[in-house]
Image (tube, rainbow, N blue to C red):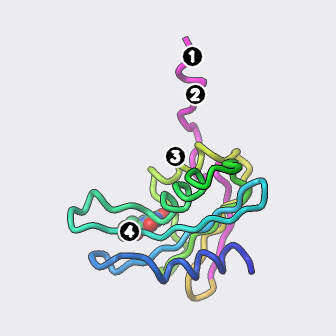
Amino acid sequence: MSLIDDARAVRENAHAPYSKFKVGAAIRTTDGQVFVGCNVENVAYPEGTCAEAGAIAAMVAAGGARTLAEVAVIADSPTPIPPCGGCRQKLKEFGAADVPVTLATMAGGSETTTIGALLPGAFDASHMES
Ligand code: THU
């Protein structure tokens, strides 16, 4: 099963009654573990969370390796969906610039980019050095 298959499966569990837009995400860590997440919306709209954020939270909570090796995101969209700005920063926190990110549609479209390409000029810890 590919990482996109994992993302497609968890997408079904999304709680998206407001946008009706279900998203699934799956991440593989450098020690081979896979974690999944889906978007979880809330009637107080800003409290909703993205699929990528859910997968990252599951990885961190599991307590093992927290270095990303691969990321996959899927939605039922005309073209592969780009992760939102906040999720790009969240992915960057745990993955190197060259980590592949596959973005897919339910219709079979897909494209692969990288964490670095998604967030050029990223803010990181070096910016806090005095
Ligand atoms: N969404 C994600 O879960 N991931 C993305 O990369 C883009 C957007 C969700 C948030 C919200 O529940 C719905 O898609 C519509 O914006």
Please state the extent of the stretch shown in magenta in the rendering: 109-130
The residue indicated by pointer 1 is 129
The furthest residue to the top: 130
Name the residue tied to disc 4.
Answer: 40
Q: Which mark is residue 125?
A: 2
Outermost residue, bottom direction? 107
Q: Secondary structure at mark 2?
A: helix
Tally the marks: 4
Quadrant for the N terminus in the image: bottom right
Using the numbered discs, state the Cα–Cα distance from disc 2 to disc 3 in whole angstroms: 12 Å
> Is residue 114 part of the magenta span, yes or no?
yes
CB within 8 Å, label 1 to label 2: yes
The residue shown at (74%, 49%) is 98
Return the x and y of residue 46 as percentages of the image width and height. Answer: 27, 57
Q: Dot 4: within a 10 Å radius of its alpha carbon, few (fewer than 14), some, or many (20 or more) residues?
A: some
Of the 4 image quadrants, the one containing the C terminus is top right
Query: Relative to residue 91, is residue 85 drawn left or right?
Result: left
Q: If you read the primary sequence from the N terminus, does the residue marked by circle 2 or circle 4 appear first?
A: 4
> What amino acid is labelled 1 in the image?
Glu
Residue at the image point whose x is 39% and y is 78% from the top: 21
The residue where tag 3 is placed is 89
- Separation (CA) of disc 1 from disc 4: 36 Å
